[in-house]
Each structure stands twice: as structure tokens, then as C-alpha cells.
Image (tube, helix red, strand yellow):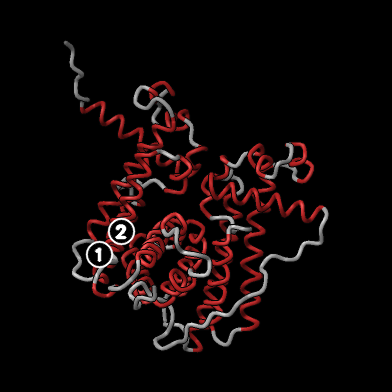
Amino acid sequence: MTTSRPPTKRYEQRKHAIVSSAVEVINRKGVRGMTLADVALRLNLVPTGVIYYFKNKEDLACACFLHGIELFNELSAVGEAGASVRERLALFLDAYFDYKGLVVLGEAEPIAVFNDVRALNNAPVNAAYLEMFRKLRGLLQGPETEGLSRAGFNARAHLLISEAFWAVVWLRRHDVEDYGRVSKRVLTITADGLAAPGAAWAPLPLPNLIAESTGGAEASSELFLRAATQLINEEGYLGASVEKISARLNVTKGAFYHHNENKDELVVACFERTFEVMRRAIRQAEAISGSGLQTLTTVAAALVSYQMSGNAPLLRASALTSAPESIQPQLLAKFDRISDRFASLISDGVADGSVRPVDTNIAAQMLTAMINAAAELHHWASDVTPEDTAELYVRPFFEGLLAPSRG
């Protein structure tokens, strides 16, 4: 009778090194963009040296996500020591930003970006990811949030976790020694929102945010934009192949290339369309609103409802991680330009007294994250309708996660 030997220390160390290397590749290229050759090259190995530990890249990606979930759960556990929801949020955010600082200094390993976790569609990873969400949701349960419905808790937990995930995009603007200061500013916005005490919650309806098509080629181009956006949101840049985009529209690849030069051109057009919808919402809201806060809430409510409708969604920023690195800087710069526009609106609200004095740059990035993350809200709160999102998801952002229960 033979028995398998337990893994040696050297085996475990090499396996861990492979996972760490793969996380860095995933965070730059996404799961579909990662290759075993990329990972091996970083460790001066041949691809078969990686296959000895992981039989394929899907297994390796699963290991990356499971390890990332384990690290994230440790940060949530720090928050559990708080005696109140506010204290738990403060402890969690401090732990999170401290850890991010250690990563920048090379003193801690990076956590895998979870943009592609659903596209991987692995049962153990999905179960662990769900449990990670539940642990974070538990930080929000206390006397301050008593009476909140399950959908309300899920919406607020999704808001919290999405802000944590998006922070990796804008933290590059801050020095590591300022991360503690950043954490405190994120806390005040997360817990207490943007609205000044007593400010009215009164978002206004906006007309159709998509410009009317003139028909013909323009209408066909819009169909390709919608199909590509939906697929990229679901499966990332590499998962949204020309074949899949064409199949969703029930057209041939020849028809695709008749309307589009190549996929990269279509992806850039999808982003441009998203930016234009957001700019149009801002312009429309400014024209009809009576305060800075009303402009902000009108824009946010309209864009989140639009995002939830599923009819013609905005392209999620997570698509950037798997888009060709050559086009990432220009697209990220345009996301920053939108956030800078939000910062200007927040400054208007602070000036007229409708918005609390907050760090406008951080608040603008958090507003961008909230709008962008609405595309995934249905995964956590399937019973939240587009009509509910303003109350259950957008309003807590502006009034704070500690605001009284409204559903």
C-alpha cells in the first residue's frame, strides 16, 4: 500500500511564488489575457515548470482568486472587532489602506483584482466569493442599520466592496504615507455621505440619455456597441470575441467587419459612448437642477437606473484590465476626466451649502465607482429593480451607509 507524501516546504514555496506571479499578470491583463508562459517568464521558469503545480491557467486563476479572497477576509476580520458599525467601517478601511500601502512598498503581496471572477465560473471560487461578500456585509449590521431589508443590506454591502475595489484605480494619485489620511476621508464619505445635514433628497428625471438614431448605418453601429458592451461587461475584453459579438446579433463575422475595422476600434467606441452618455447626463442635470447636490443626485440616479436597465449599459471600467495595454492609458485618462468633472460639481455643492465639506477628489472617484458598479448590483440584490435603485443604492451613497433604513 502506498501513501502520498505531504507537500514539502520547498514545493509550497514555489507554488506560492507562482500564484503571486500570476496575480500580478492577472491584475494587468485579466484572466483571459494571462498565459502560463507569462507567469513562468517572471520566475525564470519554462511553462512546463508551472504546469507541474497547476495543470492549466484556469486552475492557476482559481488559486489566485482563492488566495485573494483569503487575504480580503483577513481585512474584514479586522473590522469585526469594532463595537459599532462606524467603528467596524473605520477598522476595515484602515486595515485595507494600510495593506495597500504595504503592497506598494513591496512588503505585502498584491490581492488579485476580482474583475474576472464571475467569468471564470468556478464553483468553489464562486462560493468563497459569496462568503467574502457576506463577511463584509456583516460589518454593516448593528443598531445604526436596524430595520434595513435584506435587499437594502445587500445594496449597501455592494456599495462598500465596490468602493474598496475601485480604490486601486485612484490610489496611484496619493503618496503611500498619506494612505492613513485617505482612509479617514473615505470613511467620512462612506459613513455619512455627501449631502449636507437637512439637504433634500430630490433627484429629477432626465430624458433619454442615448441620442436618437437617424437610422441606417448609425442604427447598426449602435447595435454593435450595445452587444459589445454587454459581452465585455460579462466576460471581459478577451471573452468578448468577434464571433460572440456577431452571434449575439445573429450576424456573420463579415457583417461585423463591414461596420467595424477591428475589435479594438469597437472597444474604444464602446468607451467613448459610455463617456458621452455620462457627459450628457451631467449637462442635462446642470440645466434643470437648483443646487450642486441636486445636480449630483440627478446624474447618479439617472445613470444607475440606465445601467440597471440592461438595455444599453455603460461599459464597466473593469474592462480596462483586460483591454490591450496600448489603449489603457488614454481610456483611464478619460475616466479621470469624468471624475474631475464630478469633483467640480461637488465643489459647487459645497459652495452652495447642499454638500458637506469633503475631499472633492476622493468623493468624485467614489461617485464614479458607485455608478460603474451598478452593473453588478443584480448579482447581490436580484430583487432590486431599476426603480428601487435610487432609494436602496444611490441614496445611501449620498446620505451615508449609516443613514436611517429606507427599505
Q: Is residue 280 above or below residue 244?
A: below
Residue 159 percent across, percent down from the top left: 41, 64
Kindly identify the residue that appears in the image at 59 percent across and 50 percent down. Answer: 230
- Amino acid carrying mark 2 in the image: Leu
317 to the left or right of 24: right
- Amino acid carrying mark 1 in the image: Leu
220 to the left or right of 399: right
Q: How many C-alpha atoms fall within 10 Å of the one at disc 2: few (<14), some, or many (≥20)?
A: many
Q: In what quadrant of the picture does the N terminus appear?
A: top left
Q: Circle 2 sits on which residue?
A: 136
Residue 275 percent across, percent down from the top left: 63, 62
Q: Circle 1 sits on which residue?
A: 91
- Secondary structure at badge 2 equals helix
Q: Point out the residue furthest to the top here.
A: 1
- Secondary structure at badge 1 equals helix
Q: How many C-alpha atoms fall within 10 Å of the one at disc 1: few (<14), some, or many (≥20)?
A: many
Kindly identify the residue that appears in the image at 45 percent across and 45 percent down. Answer: 118
107 to the left or right of 154: left
Kindly identify the residue that appears in the image at 36 percent across and 22 percent down. Answer: 52
Q: In what quadrant of the picture does the C terminus appear?
A: bottom left
Q: Quadrant of residue 82?
A: bottom left
Q: Is residue 73 above or below residue 359?
A: above
Number of the front mark, 1 or 2: 2
Residue 316 percent across, percent down from the top left: 54, 55
Kindly identify the residue that appears in the image at 35 percent across and 50 percent down. Answer: 130
- The earlier-in-sequence mark between 1 and 2 is 1
Residue 187 percent across, percent down from the top left: 34, 70
Q: Point out the residue furthest to the front here.
A: 383
